[in-house]
Image (cartoon, rainbow, N blue to C red):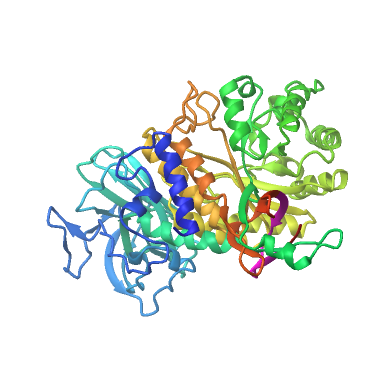
Amino acid sequence: MAFAEEELALAMKLRADGGSSTEEESSIAMKLTEDGGSEDEEEEPALPVNLLEHRGGSCSELADGGLGGWASTGSSTLSVHHDHAPPPLSATAEDVPCAHRRKPSGRYVLAAHRADEKDGLCREMPCAPKPKVTYRVAGWVALEGGPSADGGHPVHVEVRTHDGARVGGGVLVAEPGKWAEIKGAFRVDEHPRHAEVYVHGPPAGVDIKVMDMRVCAVDKIARLRHLRKKTDKVRKRDVVLKFNPRSEDGADADAAAAAVKGASIRVVQVENSFPIGACISKSSIQNPAFVDFFTKHFDWAVLENELKWYYTEAVQGQVSYADADELIAFCDRLKKPVRGHCIFWAVENSVQPWVRALNTDQLRAAVESRIRGLVSRYSGRFPHYEVNNEMLHGAFFRQRLGDDIDAHMFRETAAIDPAPALFVNDYNVESANDPNATPEKYVALITDLQRRGAAVGGIGVQGHVTYPVGDVICDALDKLAATELPVWITELDVSAADEAVRADDLEVVLREAFAHPAVEGIMLWGFMQGHMWRSHGQLVNADGTISQAGNRFMGLRQEWTSHARGKVDANGHFKFRGFHGKYVVELAAGAGGKQVRRAFDVHKGDEPLVVDMNL
């Protein structure tokens, strides 16, 4: 059995032992194995069914050459046109299932004479979506005419069921005259009689063009094959352990070398260089089941609320870090690093009332006091700081203290404590559903901070996700990676009442993050029922039992840990391919089978790592 196959077998066994679901979509990796798939196969997948291009029970292709089922909404009028210079495939097209790699047709529907933001076009899905299946919404949109706007206009693509309920979709910001790719997703919990796609959003007078809209079930198996190859390239390295026996007291060196050849060897990874952590709180560490799971399965910690300004100084002048100190001491005992979350929070309703009531001079003084007090107190303790949380969604300090205040917070923090990497941190960036939090706007924010002298040291992508789609996440990460800053998934949680769906969603995000070269770590925003911000997101139930998502999480951590056994070859070498991290090697050598134990590290690198193991 190949080593990669052995890893998967171990992961599957762990899931089976933990009571993992046997439902059709309960484990992406297990389903891949059941289907006989191999990460080395290069078969062309069948075209996924596009729910917008099929009718009735027969689901036969439409060939009417007209509007293809599109209807106007509001005052808009529709017409069909052809663009002889259609948009190119996206940069991440190679990561998308076959149907999304087809070249744009150039044929589009134009919605004109719009008198309201809600005016646009809609199209019924002749085949209704199936419950608990994640669907990808894809296509291209362009705008023309009407008022111009810096950065373009938001275009909303909504999926609604027969009762008018909105079940998902996507949002993009399109610039007039340029095609922009739609990236959205949705899922239904029950069988709808029918569902429709609506496109609207720009202001009145702006025409909307829609080209090649598709609604297809996500091909998770094809995506997994791609991610396993990518993960192997990004997170693993070939290693050669070279044993060089040293003769002692004049002993024959050849005899010593001969004793090593053929010796049994065992390589165990004791730490992965890609940390996965979780948030903790004063109440959660009082729960023995929480502490046990946290201790065994997480590498880092972040304080959920206890370091935030509204917590440490709820009343002006009454500052207390007692709870934060208790949590940090807890982590110190476990030897787990702690991220600093957060110095400020830009969203106004997250700022305590007494701060909101200050005048300009008082607020500026309070900001300076907060920076000095917090950063000086914990100087050198935190490897990361989130300086001003959620600046894409809030501008409390900027509106009152001027455009430079955000960068000032970074500059002053770095001046007091130059050790930690200073992060921006925001939500919805990876979901393609928020016009305020596109990757492009996040990059623009970072660029502006850097222009003002802020030493931005990392990008936080929170990851509060619902029905995640792998290539949508990857596209956002690719755009953020262009900054050449490290990316962390800082507050990951998935919410789904169905345990199998939750486990699959968690696996989607974890695999995408782990396979992406720009991502350097993941923090879960809770993992135990009763100690989480979002409901239906637990890995551990309130009674201490492990949920399907918890078993999936543990299985992935096992899969991403390298162990190897074998014998030293005739040249005194032992070769394996393993994940980056810390290792221990045990060698039984010599006539008496003396056991030798050595430690070594595997760092990133394209060339094989040769480690001299002098005995």
At 30% across and 54% down in the image, what residue appears? 75
Q: Quadrant of residue 307?
A: top right
On whether residue 600 falls in the magenta region, the answer is yes
Locate the N terminus and report the quarter of the image it occupies. bottom left
At 79% across and 65% down in the image, what residue appears? 252
Locate the C terminus and report the quarter of the image it occupies. bottom right
At 74% across and 48% down in the image, what residue appears? 422
Give the number of marks: 0
Q: Nearer the viewer, residue 559 or 600?
A: 600
Question: Would residue 266 appear left or right of 138 to someone viewing this image?
Answer: right
Q: Position of residue 285 (x, y in %)?
A: 64, 23
Which residues lie in the magenta part? 596-612
Placement of 177 over or under 346, stated as above or below: below
Q: Quadrant of residue 206?
A: bottom left
Question: Would residue 113 appear left or right of 362 to someone viewing this image?
Answer: left
Q: Nearer the viewer, residue 578 or 110?
A: 578
On whether residue 386 falls in the magenta region, the answer is no
Residue 41 appears in view: yes
Main SS category, magenta section? strand
Q: Position of residue 71 (x, y in %)?
A: 24, 56
Q: Position of residue 66 (x, y in %)?
A: 20, 68
Q: Position of residue 200 (x, y in %)?
A: 38, 53
Residue 173 appears in view: no
Placement of 88 over or under 550, stated as above or below: below
